[in-house]
Each structure stands twice: as C-alpha cells, then as structure tokens.
Image (cartoon, rainbow, N blue to C red):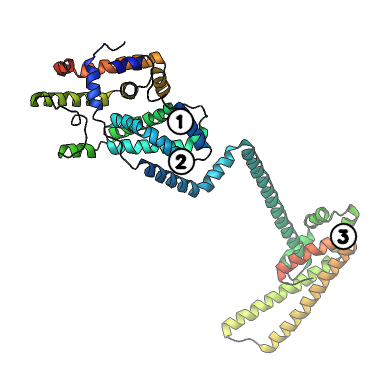
C-alpha cells in the first residue's frame, strides 16, 4: 500500500496545500474572550451546577431521599393528628349539645332517651380521659340523673324559640310587635338562659368531680374551646 | 516524495517536535499559569488552522473551530494527565469539531464568504487560485485549476476517517501511530484508510488523467 515514487497525486496534493491561507491574527483575544464568556455563564449557572454536583454524590442523594421520606412521614403524622383533633372537637361539640339545652334543644331529647346514644357520646371521654369503668358508670349516672331537668329546659328553650319566631313573623307582617309582651319574653328568655347555663355547669362540675385532677383539667380544657366555638361563651 | 517516505517511516515532525514543551506548558496551565495557553496557541495555531481549513475550506469556520479547541483545552486541562500527548489531543478535538461542523453544514447549506469573494474576483484565497502557475500557458493554467478544484472537491467528499487520515498524513506529516490515536484505529487501519483515500482520489481524477500524470 506504499504510494509509488513520484506519485502525481502527491504533487497535486502538495500544490493544493499551497493554497492554505495563513491563520488569521487575533486568535488569542478571541480565545480569551470566549473563555471569559463561558466563565460568566458558569457563574450564572453556578447554583444549578452546584445542585447537580451535590446530587451526583451518592451519599447526598441517599441522604436527600431519606430526608424526603422522613418529611413525608412527619407530614402524614401531622395530618393524622390534625384529623384526630378535628374529630375530637366534633365529639366534644356533640357532647356539649347533649348537656347544654341552649345549643341544640331538639338534639337532647332523642339522645337522652337512647341509652345507646349516651354511651356512644360518653365513649370519647373514656378514651381521651382514660376513665375507668367505675368513673364512666358514675358519669353516666350523673347525666341520667340530670337528663329530666335538661329535657325540661330543652323543651322550654324550644318553646321560647317558637315564640320568638312568632314575634318575628308578626313584626314582618304588621311592621310592629307588642313591646310589653316582647319585653316579658326577653326577661323570661334571660332567666331560662341563666338556668340552662347553671344546669350545664352543674352537670359538668358533678361529672368532673368523679375524675382525677388531671382528668378534670383535661376535661375542662376540651370543653372550653368547643363551647366557645359553639355559642361564643365560656363555661 | 522524500517527505512521503519520511512520514511512512514514522517520522513526526509536527507532533513530536515539541512534546517536552507541550508537557511543560500543559503542567503550567494546570498549575494556573494562563500564559502557558498563549504559548500553546502560538505553537499550535498554524498547524491546527491549516488542518481545519483543508477540512472545511472556510477561513472563518476554521478560525472559529481552532479557537474552540483552545477554549476546550483551557476548560478541560485539569482532566488531562500530565503525560498526555497534547498534539494528538488537539487534533482529536479539532477533527471531531470539523466532522460535526461539516455534517451540520451539509444539513444547513449556505454560501461561504470565501466562495463569494472568489466569485466576485476578490483577493480571497481559494484552493485553485493560490497555486502558482507562473510558467504555464493559459490553457494549461485553466486545466490545472480545474484539476485542483476537482481534487479539493474529491477530498471534501471523502468520509471523515479517510479525510482526516489523508490530511494529517500528507500535510501535517503525522505518523501512523499518532493518526491512529487521533482517529481511534490501529496503525494498520491507518495505512488501509490512507490507501483507500488515495484510490478514491485517483478515481475521481480519472477525467483529468493527463494532468494527473504530467505534473
């Protein structure tokens, strides 16, 4: 495969090679300019390149994945805890509607008449306050003892609400109400409210007397925000 | 033809003439001495540009790619081993850049400024124009110009590996072993490629038989 001596092709290649122009000047400035531009681009992309370099290390990637898993577990736990708190709040509010005639008078009667419902309502107390069977039985007894009075109050509250509706209907129809009758209604309603509050407070106090100080404190802490949320007042 | 014999007998005038200087400058560059890059540019600009120009036949593109080679040398110098044959590395990068650029240009045809300059009768240097024809008659001059144009076209049509092998061997006088490093093949493979390239050029120049036979 050696080229023959005096190969005319070599002569032509040599002549063609003579056509090569000299290299342009100013190569060095051009090279340094490009290097400077590339450095600037590197500086701009420095943050992302650092991130990329960090993730290129297996130890960092594994640590990051582990951190993500832990964070996900933490958030799941937080979410579960939040749902539990919301669930407890609903249970407490249901309980309050049971013991406070002012909140939902129509709700008390069917609940009080159903021992199963009362057991269900009190079940959260057993779990959250860690009541023993004896405490639970005594608390149920307290509720059952006061239930007739609560039912009476609930009936009166319901009647008062109906009376108020009639006043309102009269005001809309005639544009006025009997002021004396309405004043007596307001006075009677205040008296009933006070009696309801005292009744609820007495029930809560008697129920809490069955509990240990820690259980009592937790019981009141649970009821107070729920009561505030329900009727804007405190115990 | 003496030059051909020297090349075949593994004499490497360009690549091996300054390996110590290259190694010294590369190590200086790796230590942060930026002036070493200037010295390397001064040493290698001309052969690199000549190779790129012969590959692309475009002054601006050749200049652009040679500049890119030195930019890459600066950016990647820390990855090079101290005993790297810098000449082989430079030509490897440049030949790859030329190959990529040539393929890109085939997909995106455009008119070279060099060609426009030639067409307008400007002073631009082209393959055929720059060859001295001082002792030839006008008809022979025209014929020779056509032969050289055909040769330039035939070289341009050579596959990348054959073209790189031919240009490095004939013009840069690079040894087979060095060409093998640059084109990633054995010395025997280089020899074969060189033979095939020359056969292809001869076939392309068959219509100009008289010119090719009578220099």
Q: Which mark is residue A214?
A: 3
Q: Residues within 10 Å of mark 1 (few under 14, many from 20)?
A: many
Which residue is pictured at 79% across the width and 60% down the height? A113
Q: Is residue B72 left or right of residue A90?
A: left
| On-image quarter of the N terminus of chain A | top left
User: Relative to the observer, which residue lies in front, B135 or B177?
Assistant: B135
Disc 3 crowd, CA 10 A, few/some/many (<14, 14-19, 20+): few
Q: CA distance from mark 3 to mark 2?
A: 81 Å
Which residue: 82% across, 62% down? Answer: A219
Q: Is the Cβ of the residue at disc 3 closer than 8 Å to that at disc 2?
A: no
Identify the residue position indicated by label 2 in the image. Answer: B35
Most foreground residue, A75 or B196:
B196
Chain identity of mark 1: B
Residue found 8% across the figure and 25% down from its top = B139
> Going by the image, does A131 lie left or right of B44?
right
Where is residue B208? Give x, y as percent.
Answer: 15, 19
Q: Mark 1 or mark 3, which is nearer to you?
A: 1
Query: In the rendered structure, which disc, 1 or 2, sits on the residue that comes first in sequence?
Result: 1
Gap between marks 1 and 3 measured at Cα: 85 Å
């Amino acid at each position: 495969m050696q080229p023959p001596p005096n190969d005319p092709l070599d002569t032509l290649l040599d002549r063609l090679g003579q056509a090569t122009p000299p290299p342009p000047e100013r190569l060095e400035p051009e090279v340094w300019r490009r290097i400077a531009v590339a450095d600037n681009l590197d500086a701009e992309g420095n943050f992302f390149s650092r991130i990329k370099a960090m993730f290129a290390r297996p130890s960092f990637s594994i640590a990051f994945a582990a951190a993500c898993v832990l964070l996900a577990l933490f958030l799941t736990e937080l979410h579960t805890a939040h749902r539990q708190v919301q669930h407890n709040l609903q249970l407490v509010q249901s309980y309050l509607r049971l013991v406070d005639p002012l909140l939902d008078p129509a709700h008390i009667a069917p609940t009080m008449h159903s021992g199963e419902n009362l057991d269900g309502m009190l079940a959260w107390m057993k779990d959250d306050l860690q009541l023993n069977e004896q405490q639970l039985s005594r608390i149920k007894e307290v509720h059952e003892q006061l239930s007739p009075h609560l039912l009476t109050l609930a009936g009166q509250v319901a009647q008062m609400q109906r009376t108020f509706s009639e006043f309102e209907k009269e005001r809309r129809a005639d544009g006025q109400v009997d002021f004396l009758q309405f004043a007596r209604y307001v006075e009677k309603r205040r008296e009933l409210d006070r009696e309801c509050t005292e009744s609820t407070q007495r029930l809560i106090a008697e129920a809490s007397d069955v509990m240990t100080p820690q259980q009592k404190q937790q019981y009141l802490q649970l009821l107070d925000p729920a009561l505030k949320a329900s009727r804007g007042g405190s115990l | 033809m003496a030059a051909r014999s020297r090349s075949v007998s593994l004499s490497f005038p360009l690549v091996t003439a300054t390996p110590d200087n290259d190694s010294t400058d590369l190590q200086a560059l790796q230590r942060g001495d930026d002036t070493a890059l200037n010295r390397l540019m001064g040493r290698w600009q001309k052969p690199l540009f000549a190779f790129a120009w012969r590959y692309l036949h475009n002054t601006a593109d050749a200049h652009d790619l040679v500049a890119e080679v030195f930019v890459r040398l600066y950016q990647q110098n820390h990855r090079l081993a101290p005993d790297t044959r810098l000449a082989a590395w430079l030509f490897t990068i440049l030949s790859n850049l030329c190959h990529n650029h040539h393929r890109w240009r085939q997909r995106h045809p455009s008119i070279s400024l060099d060609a426009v300059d030639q067409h307008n009768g400007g002073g631009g240097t082209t393959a055929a124009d720059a060859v001295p024809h001082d002792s030839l008659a006008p008809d022979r001059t025209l014929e020779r110009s056509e032969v050289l144009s055909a040769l330039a076209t035939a070289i341009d049509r050579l596959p990348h590996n054959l073209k790189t092998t031919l240009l490095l061997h004939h013009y840069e006088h690079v040894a087979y072993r060095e060409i093998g490093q640059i084109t990633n093949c054995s010395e025997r493979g280089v020899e074969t490629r060189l033979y095939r390239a020359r056969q292809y050029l001869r076939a392309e120049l068959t219509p100009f038989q008289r010119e090719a036979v009578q220099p």
